[in-house]
Each structure stands twice: as structure tokens, then as C-alpha cells.
Amino acid sequence: MAAPMLRWCCPGRRFAFTRVGCGSCHRRGPPTGSTSNGKRGQSTVAQQPHITAQKPRKGEREWAAVVGLEIHAQIASNSKLFSGSQVHFAAPPNSLVSFFDASLPGTLPVLNRRCVEAAVMTGLALDCHINRKSLFDRKHYFYADLPAGYQITQQRLPIAVNGSLAYSVSVGRKPSQMVTRTVRVKQIQLEQDSGKSLHDDLRSQTLIDLNRAGIGLLEVVLEPDMSCGEEAATAVRELQLILQALGTSQANMAEGQLRVDANISVHRPGEPLGVRTEVKNLNSARFLARAIDYEIQRQINELENGGEILNETRSFDYKLGFMPEPNLPPLLLYDSGSLPPGADPQQVIDIDRLRERLPELPRVTRERLVRQYGMLPEHSCALLNEVGLLEFFQSVIKETRAEPKKVTSWVLNTFLGFLKQQNLAVSESPVTPSALAELLDLLDRKAISSSAAKQVFEELWRNEGKTPAQIVAEKKLELLQDLEALEQLCRSTLEAHPHVVMDLKRGNPRAINKLIGLVRKATLGRADPTAIKEVLERQLSS
């Protein structure tokens, strides 16, 4: 059989396959099975199981937990995986459905080039082996929002296999106590999403919306190398950051663009793995962690009370449920060494060219921030964990003369704190990077005090259209620059509070702070505490 060639069939970077010389996803259907190889108790996976934190009673043994994940990420593409229908969140029901999406007779799939490139780039970013040849399969199961009665996926020979995902977790009470762990990526496969069923209990009916049917998904299968909810949630968050950095998926969990199925089992250390259960369609990292930890404890309680764990997701025989997709020939990929002579670059996928397009990945970005700005590792993590926060920080850095350490503190403490108080995204902030940079410049050249700077920030947050300099002038927040006036205020304060002075001379180091506070109160907060302390110490020693 001759290898397929690619031909353009319509605008939007799409191609179809032709043979030369010859004629999520909901996952509410049958499951794809465990992420481990073979039967339970016979897995070849090297695992680091979670040991329960509770100290066992006398005569009891500890439990170990094993967690694997199947993650479904919606590919960032203007059109669906096999049709030209647009992809748009919250569009009117059934307004983005082609004949192929509705599975009308005579329609054929046309593979979306963008989706293939997204899968390859994701595989490269996760250090996967990219299969030069991958296959499409039909997974047969019936559900009302799956019009064809099957899902096109890549179960047998996926596009990428055998990768790894590194993530950092906290191992102590301090945020700085972090260790890096790695979970193996079993495979990455392309597949269709299903539609959506809307159940109306009042009318006892179900409505079907096929806008989502046929949207391209990346299914990333993580081996059961994790052992608790925190590890799983952290690994998912790291993958989310990678997908967003690559631009292969927006990975917005609130909009269903990233959904997770968790496979969970518990066993006694040294004994075969236990029977797994599956928790499906989790779309929040926080809820994922809670659901996994809850299920681990539920299984432990069940076993300790003499019960047994049932495989609550039916086993599924791929030989019965899968068949080759007859309308799609093998997907062939190339590198610079295997590219056919004279091949049209628009008609083939070149892995090496996609490798060159890979952006800086989150792990590298965190390392660069620590190295470039001398920030703590946990601060670099915080900057990346909030969408748009790193870009905001870098914009402030470019426009201010303040030290990076001070910028980091203001962005992560003051700025991010205000965002969280009002449940706003970075893009919704009333304070721009330029405004914060100007405020930090005023603080850096000692034009205002730290407390005054916070007052200015609060005024900026009210979004009254004023600059930091204008607010300082209107509120008369500039620091007192008249040294003689400051010396007179310090002298008057010492004379008015002899008991505090006596307390200081008796060896109470906190008494100086009392005096500084009294002077600052007299200056309405316009005096620099460091300058006040210097003047007071000089007057006390004279």
C-alpha cells in the first residue's frame, strides 16, 4: 500500500489524505482501561506509592495509594478535528455543527493540520517519542450526544509515547521546601470530543447540543506514578502551564478545555496493587486533589472494615470495542532526514521544524527568573501560576529603576493580594504595569514612604485616572525633606516622652520604635523611618 500524501482541501490550514495508486471528552462510554500495563497486581510500572500520614495503630500496617491520570485538553484551533466547523465557547446550541459532525451519510473526515502540529509540539515538550506513523481507530459505544455511535481516536498506535512530566511539590510547612518529582507520560493521542447532553428534570427530557462534537482533543495519559491528590493536582497544573506556553491549548478548566479522569487504588506496601476505581470529568485542580484524597480514604475505610473495592468503571476489551478507522489512512510524519525530496512544506508535517518553534517552557522560565532576578523558587512558581502575572511583572521591571526584589514583593504581595480580594484576573486589574512602575520609582528615590506608597496604590486601584505623582501631590504624601524641621520634631518628641527615653536607656530596644512612631505621627507619615531613627540616635547620644 502506497504511503498517503497530503492535499489541501479548504482554507484554515486543513488537509485530507489521499492514497497514491489506489482508491473527553465525556468518556461516558466504555473506559479506555487502567493506565498501568496488564492486570492489577502484575503492573510493570515503577511506582512510588503514597503512605498514609496517619500513624497506624499497634498491629496495623500502613496503606499505599497509586494514582494515574487521563487528561483531555481541547486543542486551540479555529476549527474542529475532522470538519471545518468553527470552535467557539458559549455559542448558541447546535449553531456550529457540520454535516460530518452530525454524522450524516456520505460525509468524510478531513484532518486538521493545526491539531496534528499541536499534538507533535506537546509531545516534544514532554520529551515523548514522536511516532513517524500513527493510526486512527473507532471506539464504539452508544450515547445520545455521539451521533456516529463511535469516537475517532488513536488507541492502538498514538502520535506520541514514552515521555515525562516534571513538577515540584512542597514537602514541608515552608514554601521553600520543595522537591521535583517526575511522572511518566504513557502516550498522547488525538481524538474527537463528544457533544453535550443537557438534562431537564422538570420536563423529564434531555436536550442535545452538538457544538462540541468533533472538537479536537489531546488525551495525555500519565502512568500511575503519583500517590496523592496534591501530587496529581500539581502535575495537572504543570501540564496546563506547558500547554498554555506552547499555545496548543488554552487549557481553561472553567470552560471545560481541560478535563481529568483519575484512576485510584490502595494496597498494603509489598503486596499486589489493589482494584482501581475511576473518578471522571474533573475540571478543577483543587477538586481533583480533594476527590483523589477522598477516594483514597474511602477505599482504606472500606478495606479496613472488611469490605472490598469494586471496579466501578466497567472493563473494556479493545478487541471488541475498537476497529481501524477506514476513512483515514495512517498519519505519516517526517523529520529533516526523512523528508521526501521536493515535498511541499505545506503538505507534510516536519517534526524538526516544529521543534525549532517550541517556546521557553515553564520549568526553564522559572529557572531563568531565579537566575536573572535572584528571586526565590517559590516566587518564580507564583509568577507563572497566575495567568498574565509574569507578563505584568516583566513589564514593571522594564519601566522601573526599583530593584527586582522590591518589584517581586509588590507584585506578589500587594498587587496579587488586591486581585484575589476582588476575584479579578490580571487582565482586569485597574492598575497598569506603568502605574506600578512609576509608584515604585517614587519609592525608590525616597520621594514617599512605604506606608504612603500603599495609600497611593489604594487610590490607583479605585481607577480614578490619576498618576501616582498626582495622587502624592494632592494627598501631600511626599516625604519631609527639611532636615532641620525633622530634627526639631525629634527633639520635641524626646522632651515630651521622658519615660520612653528612660525605658530605652535601661536597655529596652523596642522603645526606639515607639519614638519613631510618635515622630511619624507628628509628620502625618511623611518622614522616612530610617531618617527618623538616625536623627533620634544622634540626639540621644549627644
Image (tube, rainbow, N blue to C red):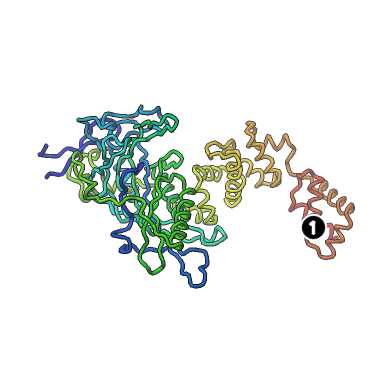
Viewer-nearest residue: 522 or 93: 93
Above-or-below relation of 89 to 396: above
Q: Quadrant of residue 259?
A: top left
Q: Residue at x 44, y 47 (%)?
A: 241
Q: Residue furthest bottom?
A: 59
Q: Mark 1 sits on what residue?
A: 512
Q: Residue furthest front?
A: 306
Q: Residue 131: where, in percent of width, then height? A: 25, 51
Viewer-nearest residue: 365 or 37: 37
Above-or-below relation of 232 to 218: below
Viewer-nearest residue: 460 or 479: 460
In the displayed structure image, the side of residue 466 where residue 368 appears, left or right:
left
In the rendered image, is residue 182 in sight?
Answer: no
In the rendered image, is residue 179 in sight?
Answer: yes
Q: Residue 1: where, in percent of width, then height? A: 11, 45
Above-or-below relation of 269 to 83: below
Q: Residue 111: where, in percent of width, then height? A: 25, 38
Decide: few, some or many residues near mark 1? Use Cα within 10 Å; few <14, some 14-19, many ≥20: some
Q: Residue at x 85, y 57 (%)?
A: 500
Q: What's the residue type where badge 1 is placed?
A: Ile
Secondary-structure class at tag 1: helix
**Which quadrant of the rendered structure holds the C terminus?**
bottom right
Viewer-nearest residue: 433 or 329: 329
Q: Residue 347: where, in percent of width, then height? A: 22, 39
